[in-house]
Amino acid sequence: MKCYACGYEKRQKFVNVAEVKRFKSGKRKGEIKEVKEDRIDVFEKDPKFIEVLVAKGSVETHIRDKAPFWGSDGYEEVTIYACPQCGTLKIDENYL
């Protein structure tokens, strides 16, 4: 997602990292005990777009889970995203 006004876009770059654990004592000292592999996002601290949920007159600002927030499918709702840099609002592309 990209901001129309300032051009801000949350960067993502994933890197595979590995942590090697070695034996510290005994006859196998220095040999590899285990290798833990992980995948991290280099730009994890970049701010995300803020979700503003609007449904029948109520407004909530949060990061929403997959479950519906209002609990009932009878509500009409739209998700609006606010840019973390300039505050410009953008309607969810899936809604249009």
Image: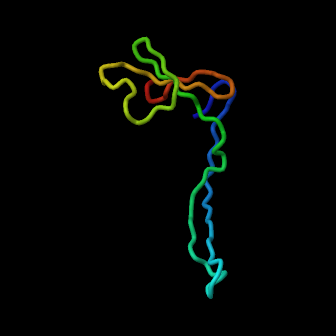
Q: Residue at x 43, y 11 (%)?
A: 57
For residue 86, side relative to residue 38 (left or right): right
Image position of 55 (left or right of 90)? left
Which residue shows up at 58% across the image and 31% down it?
49
Q: Position of residue 50 (x, y in %)?
A: 57, 28
Q: Is residue 58 above or below residue 8?
A: above
Q: Which residue sits at x=41%, y=17%?
A: 55
Quadrant of the rendering where the N terminus is positioned = top right
In this rendering, the answer to whether 29 lies above or below 61 is below
Q: How many callouts does the rendering have?
A: 0
Expressed as whole percent of the image width and height from the top left, the position of residue 35 reads: 57, 70
Depth check, front residue: 57 or 36 = 36
13 sits to left or right of 74: right
Q: Compare residues 71 and 73 and report the one nearer the observer.
A: 71
- Colour scheme of this structure image? rainbow
Q: Residue furthest top?
A: 57
Q: Residue at x 65, y 77 (%)?
A: 24
Residue placed furthest toward the front: 26
Image quarter hosting the C terminus: top left
- Image coords of residue 3 (percent x, y): 63, 28
Up the image or down, 35 lies above or below 83; here it is below
Q: Quadrant of residue 5?
A: top right
**Horizontal and vertical percent position of residue 7:** 67, 30
Q: Nearer the viewer, residue 72 or 26?
A: 26
